[in-house]
Amino acid sequence: MNKQHTEISKFLSFVLRHKPEVIGITLDREGWVDISILIAAAANDGKQLDPDLILTVVADSDKKRFAISADGLRIRAVQGHSAESVDIEFVAKRPPKLLYHGTATRFLESIQVKGLLSGSRQYVHLSQDEQTAIAVGQRHGKPVVLKIEALLMHEQGFKFFQSENGVWLTEAVPVTFIQ
């Protein structure tokens, strides 16, 4: 992804996950907004977007953070929302035995006391493989990968969901399920 596409991806993440109101858009309950409305609002904010550029950024995103609706008219972030208006209805799913969470070593002490909490987001994000978790942890400092006993959690009544891009989601992970 080139520098312009990276900047646009970050902009889209910001407005489609966290602060749609800063450019004057409203996301529906499932996080969707019309692409034409997004383009007009972005232009009023000084960002030049067009449908082809948005589609290219979405297609080139290695993390597949965004989805385009089947009719090609709307866009949303697939997970990671802190915007209160968004509450995507994911279908509960049985997780694999282990999932992984990448974080930085500086957060370990807090995690060992409180477990994994969603913080400002709706869910804790978990990966199906260690490599992805390492990449996530590196964004925050010296990485460490935590193994999560997901199936055991599920069997004890915790709900798991999987977003369109394969990220596993759960509301929190108590310390007892973290290796």
Image (cartoon, rainbow, N blue to C red):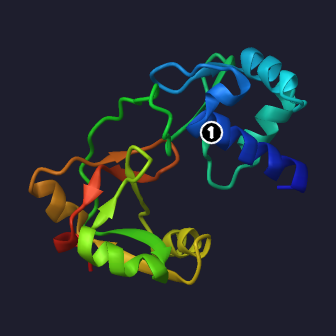
Instruction: Tell me the residue at 55%/68% (across/down).
Output: 136
**Amino acid residing under circle 1:** Phe
Query: Which residue is at the front of the view, 154 or 141?
Result: 141
Q: What element carries label 1?
A: strand
**Residue at the (20%, 62%) spot, across then down:** 151
Residue 143 x, y percent position in the rendering: 53, 81
Residue 84 vertical placement versus 99 (above, below):
above
Q: In the picture provided, is 164 more to the left or to the right than 10?
A: left
Name the residue tied to disc 1. 66
Q: Which residue lies furthest to the left in this view?
A: 156
Q: How crowded is mark 1: few (under 14 residues within 10 Å), some or many (20 or more)?
A: many
Residue 123 horizontal side relative to residue 79, left or right: left
Q: Residue 89 placed where, x, y %?
A: 36, 29
Mark count? 1
Q: In which quarter of the image is residue 9?
A: top right
Query: In the image, is 79 to the left or to the right of 48?
Result: left
| Residue at 74 percent of width and 22 percent of height | 38
Seen in the picture, residue 111 relative to 168 is either above or below; the reply is below
Q: In which quarter of the image is residue 42?
A: top right
Looking at the picture, how far across and down is residue 55, in whole percent? 77, 33
In the figure, 125 relative to 70: above or below? below
Q: Quadrant of the C terminus?
A: bottom left
| Quadrant of the frame with the N terminus | bottom right
Q: Image check: 24 left or right of 174?
A: right
